[in-house]
Image: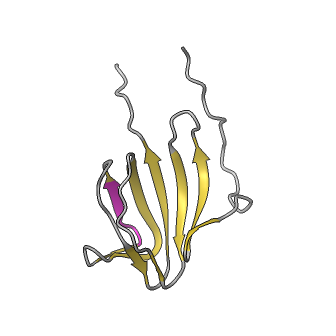
Amino acid sequence: MRRRRRRDREFSTTSKIPWRRVGEGVSEKILSRDSESGAYIRLLHFDPGAETLEVFTHDFYEEVYILEGSLTDKRLKRTFRQGMFAFRNPEMKHGPYSSADGCTTIEFRHFGLKRKEV
């Protein structure tokens, strides 16, 4: 069975994609979603002073790059800044977070890839 491909999209403006509130002072903008695999790419924005209360775990891989600002993991007592990258395996604990000056990240969330035989 041939896998259906997502629609190609050569550079487009994201200003018409709406931000959706996902927590107090935290919003997401979904840039791309694969309905078959569940994978998606999103921007996540923390307003200055925003905080989350819970420790997060999930059943997918997550790759995060901080585009601007900073994000503090309150459990680890570490602050991560613009230009830093995280890779999280499924079930990795992370957070809760706070952001004193605001933060925007790009996140790639996926359920793993099967190795392609060459």
Can you give x and y, in whole percent of width and height, for residue 47 in the image? 54, 79
Q: How is the image coloured?
A: secondary structure
Q: Quarter of the image holding residue 10?
A: top right
* Residue 78 position by quadrant: bottom left
- Residue drawn at (56%, 17%), measured in percent from left and top? 2
* Residue farthest top in this picture: 1
Q: Residue at x 62, y 34 (%)?
A: 6
Task: Where is residue 22? Give x, y as percent.
Answer: 56, 66
Q: Is residue 63 left or right of residue 38?
A: left
Determine if the magenta segment contains residue 83.
yes
Write the residue at 39% across / 67% down: 83
* Residue that lies at the very extreme toward the right in this rendered image: 16
Quarter of the image with the C terminus in it: top left
Residue 37 colored in magenta in the image: no
Q: Given the current orientation, which residue lies at the most extreme left position?
A: 76
Q: Is residue 29 above or below residue 47?
A: above
Q: Which residue extends farthest front?
A: 54
Indicate the quadrant where residue 34 lies. Answer: top right
Could you say where residue 48 lies in the image, as x and y percent from the top left?
51, 84
Seen from the viewer's position, the closer of residues 11 and 19 is: 19
Q: How many marks?
A: 0
Q: Nearer the viewer, residue 1 or 6?
A: 1
For residue 61, side relative to residue 10 (left or right): left
Q: Is 21 rendered above or below residue 106?
A: below
From the top left corner, tell me how far across and down residue 52 is, in percent: 43, 74
Q: Quadrant of the N terminus?
A: top right
Most foreground residue, 16 or 51: 51
Q: Give the magenta part as a residue range.
A: 82-87
Q: Residue sitting at 31 percent across and 77 percent down?
A: 74
Relative to 101, is 118 on the left or the right?
left
